[in-house]
């Protein structure tokens, strides 16, 4: 006797055997997979997921106000105000620190140190100071100082100098008359006073280089060549100079013991400069330098 499957009535669900169910599900998948809308939907989901992975939200920068930093802020306040801050002042100190730190980091992000010449100069000066402070500052030995003195002996020679007296008559319509009257009186050994005549100035032990910086090369050369104890009339843009060389002192070379302190100071400066230059060379050697226009 053969059993016939009952036909499903309206509203009922058909129940099939295992093989029939698998075939129906596979057919449904094939039909869904062939739909263009499904393709578009899946592709969009994949693109969206990939975009989320690639463009993750950036990490929010953190401004940490550590306990040690808070103590430092309080200490600085106490040093300035000579009292401890109140709770409100303490909060204000922290808020101001956060604001300053945010401004500083934003300035770094905007590369202000590269575009602002004042900031750039301050950073460079600060770095120079830090490098120099880190250099070896051990006191030099006597052997080092004596060797340095021998190598730079000419730097410590005291040059030839002159001492002289000068009357300066400022330029004007009566300058020449005043100068002649003054020179005539001085040559006779008389008094050098009267209306329009200046008070003399005495200059002790001036080298030729010092005269050049004081008067300029021309007048300095004429004054340097002037014979001793003779009044002369020299002219410059400032007026008329009535001068007399009082004394000439020959060049001399002091002993090492006499100039030891100066040698020590010069040696320290020279050693610091050489060490600093070596440190700069080390820093610049890390960079490849390209100068436009040079081969």
Image (spheres, rainbow, N blue to C red):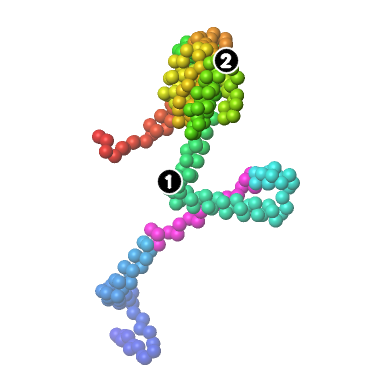
Residue denoted by label 2: 189
Badge 2 crowding class, 10 Å Cα cut-off, few under 14, some 14 to 19, many 20 or more, is few
**Which of the two residues, 207 or 142, is positioned nearer the viewer here?**
207
Q: Along the polypeptide, which appears first: circle 2 or circle 1? A: 1
The location of residue 140, given as percent across then percent down, is: 54, 16
- Residue 57, relative to residue 70: is it above or below? below
**Separation of disc 2 and disc 1 at Cα?**
70 Å
Q: In which quarter of the image is the N terminus?
A: bottom left
Q: Quadrant of the C terminus?
A: top left
- Span shown in magenta: 52-71
* Residue 114 numbered mark, or none: 1
Q: Is residue 59 magenta?
A: yes
Q: Which residue is drawn at 68% across and 46% down?
A: 77
In which quadrant of the rendered view does residue 13 lie? bottom left
Horizontal side, residue 18 vs residue 210: left or right: left
Is disc 1 placed on a helix, strand or loop? helix
- Is residue 181 shown to the viewer in this render? yes
Badge 1 crowding class, 10 Å Cα cut-off, few under 14, some 14 to 19, many 20 or more, is few
* Residue 138 numbered mark, or none: none
The location of residue 169, given as percent across then percent down, is: 52, 28
- Residue 22, relative to residue 273: is it above or below? below
Considering every residue shown, the one lying at the far right of the view is 83
**Which of the two residues, 266 or 135, is positioned nearer the viewer here?**
266
- Is residue 158 shown to the viewer in this render? no
- Residue 140, relative to residue 94: is it above or below? above
Q: Report the magenta stretch's main SS.
A: loop
């Amino acid at each position: 006797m053969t059993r016939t499957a009952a036909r499903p009535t309206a509203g009922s669900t058909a129940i099939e055997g295992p093989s029939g169910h698998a075939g129906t599900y596979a057919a449904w998948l094939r039909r869904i997979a062939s739909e263009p809308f499904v393709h578009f939907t899946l592709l969009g989901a994949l693109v969206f997921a990939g975009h989320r992975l690639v463009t993750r939200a950036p990490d929010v920068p953190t401004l940490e106000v550590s306990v040690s930093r808070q103590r430092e802020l309080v200490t600085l306040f106490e040093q300035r105000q000579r009292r401890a801050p109140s709770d409100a002042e303490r909060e204000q100190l922290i808020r101001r620190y956060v604001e300053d730190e945010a401004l500083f980091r934003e300035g770094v992000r905007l590369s202000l140190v590269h575009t602002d010449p004042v900031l750039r100069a301050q950073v460079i000066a600060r770095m120079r100071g830090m490098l120099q402070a880190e250099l070896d500052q051990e006191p030099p030995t006597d052997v080092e100082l004596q060797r340095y003195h021998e190598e730079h002996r000419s730097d410590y020679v005291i040059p030839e100098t002159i001492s002289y007296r000068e009357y300066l008559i400022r330029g004007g319509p009566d300058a020449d008359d005043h100068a002649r009257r003054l020179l005539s009186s001085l040559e006779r050994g008389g008094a050098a006073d009267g209306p329009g005549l200046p008070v003399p100035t005495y200059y002790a032990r001036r080298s030729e280089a010092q005269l050049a910086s004081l008067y300029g090369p021309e007048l300095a050369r004429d004054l340097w060549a002037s014979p001793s104890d003779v009044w002369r009339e020299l002219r410059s843009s400032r007026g008329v100079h009535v001068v007399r060389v009082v004394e000439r002192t020959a060049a001399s070379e002091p002993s090492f013991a006499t100039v030891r302190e100066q040698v020590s100071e010069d040696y320290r400066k020279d050693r610091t400069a050489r060490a600093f230059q070596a440190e700069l060379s080390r820093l610049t050697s890390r960079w490849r330098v390209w100068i436009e226009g040079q081969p």
